[in-house]
């Protein structure tokens, strides 16, 4: 188990020991990937964005002033990279018909095992999140999955605290509506 | 409306939690570090190119210095007068015999050719030494 803080490894990297960056990468890959995945919606895209974000962070490590925590700084890079990525690719507007058929079939197939139930929920949750604008997806991810306070989310996304709160409230409602619609489609 | 509120509550409790986080592929950290290693090699390559510029720059500087010295040496006055005198004396002492070959009738090679050849040899040697020095430093 590695108990040294990010600052220690950042100083090591800045002192020329670039292999110390692997500790930072190992520690934050899952969180960065989850944020990228929730914004982009596809694992392959999230992988590309995460990789890109870590390379950007490595290049800009000298500019990291340590005023905020390293994860906050990294999340900002992942957020900006994800949003730019979505702008660069053709953004598809999802409809209920896009909801994976196998996930719908699954629910109507009697008594699902717990693992499959989780997979189904993940698929449906991802679908519901993709119906939100990219900024809102990031806000929901950072608040519920990463459990960050509104102040930090505001710093990462450069959206005011009150706007973050409003977006959270609206996103929850919208996601619930989408999920209810999906489940009603599947039961028909 | 009540349906939406209930579903919303369910989403908070069961769906939107850290346990539902999407895990990164196991090989992703290795892929990232491989990209970083390539990045390092690339930036090292860039600095090598910059260093390589130093070799011709160094040669130009040395040549310019030699040219300035020769100008001062040629003049009658100035702080390089003793040097100029010494060079003139050296030239007199090593006055090379003009080459006069039977088979190249009426062609006389001036004695300065030997100096030019020596200078060229020196510059080639100097260039290769500088090149080796900077390349070693760059790696």
Image (tube, coloured by chain):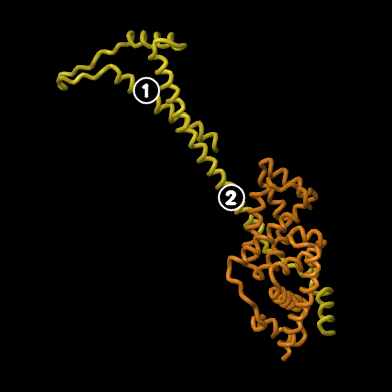
Q: Colour of chain B?
A: yellow
Residue nearest the viewer, comparing A146 with A150: A150
- Residue labelled with disc 2: B39
Residue A184 vertical position relative to residue B32 in the rendered view, above or below: below
Identify whether A3 is placed above or below B83. Answer: below
Q: Which image quarter: residue A166?
A: bottom right
Q: Dot 1, how many residues are within 10 Å of its Cα: few (below 14), some (14-19), or many (20+)?
A: few
Compared to A124, does B94 lie above or below?
above
Asked if labels 2 and 1 share a chain, the reply is yes
Secondary structure found at label 2: helix
Residue A183, x across and y down, in percent: 74, 85
The answer to which of A113 and A71 lies nearer the viewer is: A71
Q: Chain of mark 2?
A: B
Taking depth in this image into account, of B74 and B38 the one nearest to the observer is B74
The chain that appears orange in the image is A
The local secondary structure at tag 1 comes to: helix
Distance from disc 2 to disc 1, alpha carbons, whole Å, reads: 43 Å
Q: Residue furthest bottom?
A: A188
The residue under label 1 is B119
Classed neighbour count for the residue bearing mark 2: other residues with Cα under 10 Å, few (<14), some (14–19), many (≥20): some
| Residue B48 against residue A168 in the figure, above or below | above
Q: Hey, which quadrant is residue A91 in on the image? A: bottom right
């Amino acid at each position: 188990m590695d108990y040294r803080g990010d600052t220690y490894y950042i100083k090591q990297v800045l002192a020329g020991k670039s292999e110390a960056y692997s500790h930072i990468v190992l520690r934050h890959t899952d969180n960065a990937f989850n944020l990228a995945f929730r914004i982009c919606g596809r694992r392959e895209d999230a992988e590309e964005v995460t990789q890109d974000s870590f390379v950007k962070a490595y290049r800009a490590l000298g500019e990291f002033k340590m005023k905020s925590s390293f994860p906050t700084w990294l999340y900002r890079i992942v957020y900006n990279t994800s949003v730019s990525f979505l702008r660069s690719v053709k953004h598809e507007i999802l409809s209920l018909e896009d909801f994976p058929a196998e996930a719908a079939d699954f629910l109507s197939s009697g008594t699902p095992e717990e693992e499959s139930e989780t997979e189904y929920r993940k698929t449906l949750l991802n679908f519901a999140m993709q119906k939100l604008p990219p900024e809102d997806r990031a806000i929901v991810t950072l608040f519920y999955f990463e459990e960050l306070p509104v102040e930090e989310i505001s710093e990462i996304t450069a959206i005011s605290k009150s706007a973050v709160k409003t977006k959270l409230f609206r996103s929850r409602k919208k996601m619930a509506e989408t999920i209810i619609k999906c489940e009603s489609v599947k039961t028909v | 409306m009540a349906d939406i509120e209930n579903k919303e509550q369910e989403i908070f409790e069961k769906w939107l939690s850290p346990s539902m986080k999407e895990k990164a592929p196991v090989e992703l950290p290795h892929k990232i570090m491989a990209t970083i290693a390539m990045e390092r090699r690339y930036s090292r390559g860039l600095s090598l190119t910059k260093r390589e510029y130093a070799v011709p720059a160094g040669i130009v500087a040395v040549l310019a210095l030699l040219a300035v010295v020769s100008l001062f040496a040629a003049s009658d006055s100035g702080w390089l007068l003793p040097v100029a005198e010494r060079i003139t004396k050296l030239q007199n002492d090593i006055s090379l015999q003009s080459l006069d070959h039977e088979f190249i009738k009426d062609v006389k090679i001036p004695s300065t050719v030997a100096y030019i050849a020596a200078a060229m040899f020196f510059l080639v040697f100097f260039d290769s030494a500088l090149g080796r020095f900077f390349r070693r430093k760059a790696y």
